[in-house]
Image (cartoon, grey):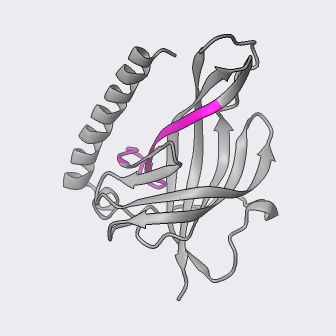
Amino acid sequence: MKLATRLALTTTAVAAVAAGTFLGVTTGTAAATGTGTGTVPPVPSAVKVPDGNRLTGVFAAEGVQTYTCTDGAWKLLEPAATLSAAHDRSHRPVALHSRGPVWVSTVDGSAVNAASVASSPRDGAVDELLLRATATRGSGVFADVSYIQRLGTRGGLAPSAACSGGDQKSVPYSATYVFYKPSA
């Protein structure tokens, strides 16, 4: 995907999130508080969160995994997804997920950066992950987050076709992101 196309998609996504966040803040309590609650999908043992952490949010994510052709092979460039409270049937966006990886609340501006510490393969989809927070900002929903799980993934695998030059391809994916904070 060329820069102009990526810019157009990003602009569209931001506009949709802004509109959804406005509606969510004015009409929905889950979006207004920024706290996602819902059912946590089954957790493979490889990506379990260590003891001493408590569940603080469960968010459904829809987006893309963007790959770029490097040395004749597809390599992950960046994720781009919107998160909504897992129980919100309207799927009002409450956070954005992007390269870093980073998650930023569109409701309160808080953010968390993280790094992958474990993975579990999933047939036909990107791996499920355990990520440890490397930094947090703000005092909202992502303040003091310690761990994040990416669970129940669907889609998002790198293209199987050959690539050349600076080709880019965005592949739709969905997942459930589960956030934890220290218990004490």
Q: Which residue occupies the foreground of this view, 75 or 97?
A: 75
Q: Position of residue 124 (x, y in %)?
A: 76, 33
Q: Which residue occupies the foreground of this view, 68 or 62?
A: 68
| Above or below, 99 relative to 11 | below
Indicate left or right for 115 with 157 as reference: left
Number of marks in the image? 0
Q: Which residue occupies the foreground of this view, 146 or 134?
A: 134
Q: Residue furthest left?
A: 26
Asked if residue 88 lies in the magenta stretch, the reply is yes
What residue is at 66 percent from the left and 38 percent from the top?
154
Residue 53, quarter of picture: bottom right
What residue is at 78 percent from the left and 52 percent from the top?
120
Q: Main secondary structure of the magenta part?
A: strand
| Above or below, 108 relative to 95 | below
| Above or below, 164 relative to 107 | above
Magenta stretch in the rendered image: 76-93
